[in-house]
Amino acid sequence: MATQDEIKQSLKMFIVLSRATKAINECTNQFFQENGLNPTEFAVLELLYHKGRQPLQKIGNKILLASGSITYVVDKLEKRGYLTRVSCPSDRRITYAEITPLGTEFMDELFPKHEQQLHEITSVLTGEEKDLAINLLKKLGLSIKDLSY
């Protein structure tokens, strides 16, 4: 059984982690907004930019978004010319989203700026501290799926 001090430490860690996540998200969301995107639109473009053509049905899981919202986001990005829908020739039930040359050009310019911003945001940490944080957060995230409530 955990002691009261251990329980309070866990609560404090949760609060600190939540506040850090909120601060990072506020900075990145402002960056996306300044570049005409919302975070979900950026996530879809980034997925297609780095991983190539994706089935619409799978995008939601890959960027942690409800599937109903994906259609709306894809519609918006398609209207802007950043992606296109492509039917699967062997299975009519499957439609892919594919980044367009305009979308690739946009991400060629935007993504390095995003990476640089993240580097600046996290520059308070050394490389070793970042590696430690990555490993600890990964350990925490992977362990949670094993818990049942």
Image (cartoon, rainbow, N blue to C red):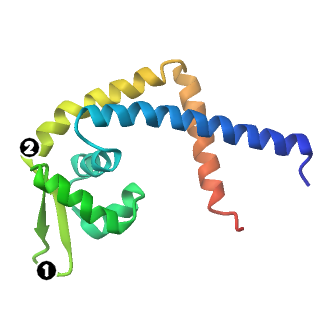
* Placement of the C terminus among the 4 image quadrants: bottom right
Residue 68 % position (x, y): 33, 68
Residue at (38%, 34%) from the top-left corner? 28
Occupied quadrant, residue 125: top right
Residue 83 % position (x, y): 14, 54
Q: Is residue 8 above or below residue 78?
A: above
Amino acid type at mark 1: Ser
Q: Which residue is mark 2?
A: 102
Q: Nearer the viewer, residue 81 or 54?
A: 81
Q: Is residue 135 left or right of residue 108?
A: right
Number of the label disc, if any, that sits on residue 12? none
> Do the CB atoms of the residues marked 1 and 2 lie less than 8 Å apart?
no
Crowding near pointer 2: few (<14 within 10 Å), some, many (20+)? few
Occupied quadrant, residue 69: bottom left
Residue 145 visible in this rendered orientation of the protein: yes
Closest to the camera, between mark 1 and mark 2, is: 2
Is tag 1's residue or tag 2's residue first in the polypeptide sequence?
1
* Placement of the N terminus among the 4 image quadrants: bottom right
Question: What's the CA distance linking mark 1 and mark 2?
Answer: 27 Å
Local secondary structure at mark 2: helix
Amino acid type at mark 2: Leu
Q: Is residue 22 above or below residue 65?
A: above
Residue at (48%, 24%) from the top-left corner? 122
Q: Is residue 145 above or below residue 21?
A: below
Q: Is residue 131 left or right of residue 44?
A: right
Q: Is residue 93 left or right of residue 84?
A: right
Number of the label disc, if any, that sits on residue 90? 1
Local secondary structure at mark 1: loop
Residue 51 % position (x, y): 26, 52
